[in-house]
Structure formats: C-alpha cells, structure tokens
Amino acid sequence: MHIFNQGKYKSLHAQSTGELAQIREQVLSDKDFRPTYHLAPPTGLLNDPNGLIFDGEHYHVFYQWFPYDAIHGMKHWKHFITKDFHTFSEADSLIPDEMFESHGCYSGGAILWQDKIVAFYTGNTRRASDNQRVPHQNIAIFDKSGKLLEKRCIIDQAPEGYTEHVRDPKPYLTIDGKIRFVLGAQRQDLTGTALIYEMDNLESKPRLISELALPHFDNHNVFMWECPDLFQLADKDIFVWSPQGKLREIQQFQNNFHATYAVGTLSGNQFNAEHIEELDYGFDFYAPQTVQQANGILYGWVGLPDLTYPTDRYKWHSMLSLPRQLSLQNGKIYQKPVSEVYAQCHSSQKVLIENRQTIAHLDTAYLQFEWQNQPLNIRFFDNAQGHHLTLNYQDGLLSLDRSASEQTELMAQFGEIRYCRVERLEKVEIFFDRSVMEIFINDGEKVMTSRFFIANRENIIQVSQPLSLEIAQISAIEYK
C-alpha cells in the first residue's frame, strides 16, 4: 500500500487525526442547502456515479469523491449498499493506494462475476519525468457484503492512435458469457469516440475489438466521449454518453457539457441510431450511468465539470440525482423516479393556490399538478433579497429561470435560463430538496434537473392563475 499525499492528490490514508471531522463541522454549518433525500458527500466533492450494480438482493452505489475540499482532487470511490434507495449502509471505499492509481480512481462500472462484484475503473497516473498522464484500466473485486478483496491493473497504457484521455470503462456480459467494456476515448486528432474491449474471463488480457461507430451523431467539435454506457431496454439497444465539446444551442445542449442517449440497434461495432437526444434539459446533470442487472435504473451527477457552487464555501459540492426508472415510449426514453422514491412520500394534501401562498416545508416537498396546455407562470420561494425561481410555460416551451438567485460567476457564465420544448404540457412533478429540483414532465417525457441557491428562504408559491397542487413530504435518507 502506498500513501499518496501530493497537494490535491491526497488519499484517505494520508488524513491526519480529526481532519475529516473538522471539515465535517464546516459542512454541517450549511443550514440552507444540504439535501435530505439525495445522496450527497459527507465532506468534499462528489461527481460521477460509479460501479452501479444490483447483486440480486442489494444495490451497490459508488460515486466519485474527493474528501478534503470542494475541488477535483484525488478521486476515491465512496461506496453504499441499499435495498430500497432510502436506507444506506456504508461499505469499503475504493482508495487510491497502488501505483496504477497514483493520482486517483477515475470513473467506471461493475459486473457480477462468479458471485463477486467486479468494478472496472480508470487509474489516473502521471509520469514523474514529464507529468504526462498515463491511463491504467483496473479492476477492483468486492464481495456482496461490500468488502474489498483485491485490485489489479489490466491495461497499463492508452492504445496506439489515442491520447491519454482514455477512461471510464463500463462493463457488460455478452450472450456467450464473455466480458466486454466500452471505454471513452480521444483520438490522436483530438476527436471523441468510444472503444470496445473484450475479455474471455477476468484472467485474460483485454482485446481491443474496435471503435463504437455512431454515424447518426454529429461529432463536430466533440473532443472526448466520457462515461459511455451500452445496455438494452425493452427490445432496443441504448447508448448513453457525455460528449464533451458539442456546441451549445438555444433550446438544447445548453450547458457547457451534456448527457446524451441514442436508441437503436447495435450491429457489430456500429450503433444504428433511430433517435438521439439529451437525457436532461436542466442546468445541472452529467455523467449518468445505469445500474447493471437492474433493468434500466439510472443515476446522474447533479453537477457539471468545471463549475463552482455557493456550497463550495462549506467544503461540499454536488450530489447524485434521484434513482430513475427508464422506459421506452414512442422510440424515446422516458424517466421517472423509481417506485421506492414515491413510497417515501407522506402527509399528502391537495392545495388550491389562487395567487400567493405559503407552503410548509416546500423546499423538501414533492409537487404534482395536471395542466391543460395553457400558459402558466409559477414563482417559487422568496427571501429578503427577493431571490426566487420562475417556471414558465407558453407556446410549447417550458423555461426555468434562476437569474434571481445566488450564483457563482461560473454558473452565470453559462446562462440563467434553461428551455425545454414540450408540445403539450399535461402533467408536472417537481421534487425539491433544499438546493436541487428535479422536474419530470408528462410522466417522464422530459426532465429538468437544476441546482438553485436561495438562503433564508420563505416557502412561498405564487401563480399567474389558479393551480391545484398535490403536495407531499419526502422522508430523509437514513444512513446505517
């Protein structure tokens, strides 16, 4: 075991006595923004969901984690186990302590192999001579109780023809029992792609089969494909990935980076897409991953690369989305929170709001209303500074405006309104959790996930015309 402690490349093994407890006190001093029913880091920065798998009885949820500050430092994998997405027990983390992960454990996925959980991940290393990154593709084997059994490297360099940006392996099993994984990559000409590798078993050397061809996707300006994920849903193949560099547009691809999916058929190494679209139209959603062996359950990172948030001053950053159940309807992906999330809703009541009304505990509530495709303007929250959110629908366009709320300079740089084209607005569900909202439109036809920061808020709703709401509270996550 190596104890890495090189500036921001500091592993948990290098922590001093009481260091994390002191940081935790600073985190808990945040009285306005810490979520209650979303997975958030105890300290430091959370980003990509990793190693998501159902072992036949429990779900294992890992996420990228830098424990010491709200920066992208040495990445660990934090590890939780749950049966119901409500009560979580902590299991062994993935801590960088081998030379093949000397600068962090980057993202990846997991499979169940011979009754063990095998996590595939990228070890970030740097050569001492020139500080050049050298990616290693590694495996970490856990038993079902969450105990880490072993780690080892299976590929110790980028393949010929590609830069050092080769990462985020997501494994799956073929019909004939072989192991494959799809890997995000950047070609030498600095364009993004994905690679497919195959292994006969865990002891065999991975073989590069080919790139994953996606001819119907406009790859112009895209320099990297992050967090690729190949799986099946109903009778279709699905490819989910995060293409970096795609140009921003007015009503889609509005963020600095995006999370995208394709529905179609995988034939050999070519993915013949019938539909390509973003997974989420909000301000903050990236690096989604499906849960292996769970039939279309997905988590995303409620955050984006290169962004700062007001909670950084409390030494914590970001959270995971609610777990979502994916389905295929009309050739497109629909997303809804899993049934276990709805099971935690309680104290439901119906409220008719005619103008402006206080709603107790609105900032941790579930809201649902039906609508008949008419214009609508809703204003949420208020404080002494006049901070609020505005949700507006008119002429087939739903918009979320957070301009009248606290933002960092980087948040504001990428715009203060997000748009989502909805031809007929019929149903809206909103999950508020103190500094995050997830909006599910028309039973999951579209989704908008966004952070917002309104301190010392009043829980107020103001509407442009009478609105009948169903409102419920959601039980906080329990950690065992």
Image (cartoon, grey):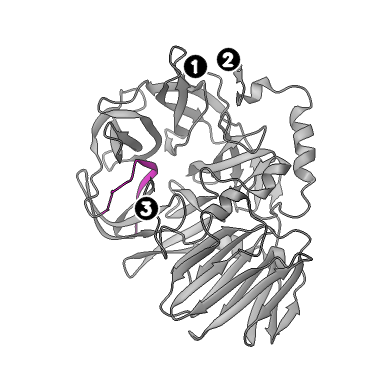
Q: Mark 1 points at which residue?
A: 99
Q: Can residue 200 be seen in this view?
A: no
Asked if 148 appears above or below 342 in the picture, the reply is above
SS at mark 2?
Answer: loop
- Specify few, some or many for label 2: CA neighbours under 10 Å numbering under 14, 14-19, or 20 or more: few
Q: Was residue 199 drawn as part of the magenta stretch in this picture?
A: no
SS at mark 1?
Answer: helix
- Label count reads 3
Q: Name the residue under label 2.
A: 2
Q: Residue 327 in the image: x percent, y percent?
A: 41, 63
Asked if 259 appears above or below 346 in the picture, the reply is above
Q: How far apart are marks 3 and 2 (CA)?
A: 41 Å
Q: In this view, does 5 lie to the left or right of 357?
A: left
Q: Name the residue under label 3.
A: 247
Image depth: mark 3 or mark 1 in front: 3
Q: Which of marks 3 and 1 is nearer the N terminus?
A: 1
Q: Was residue 224 drawn as part of the magenta stretch in this picture?
A: yes
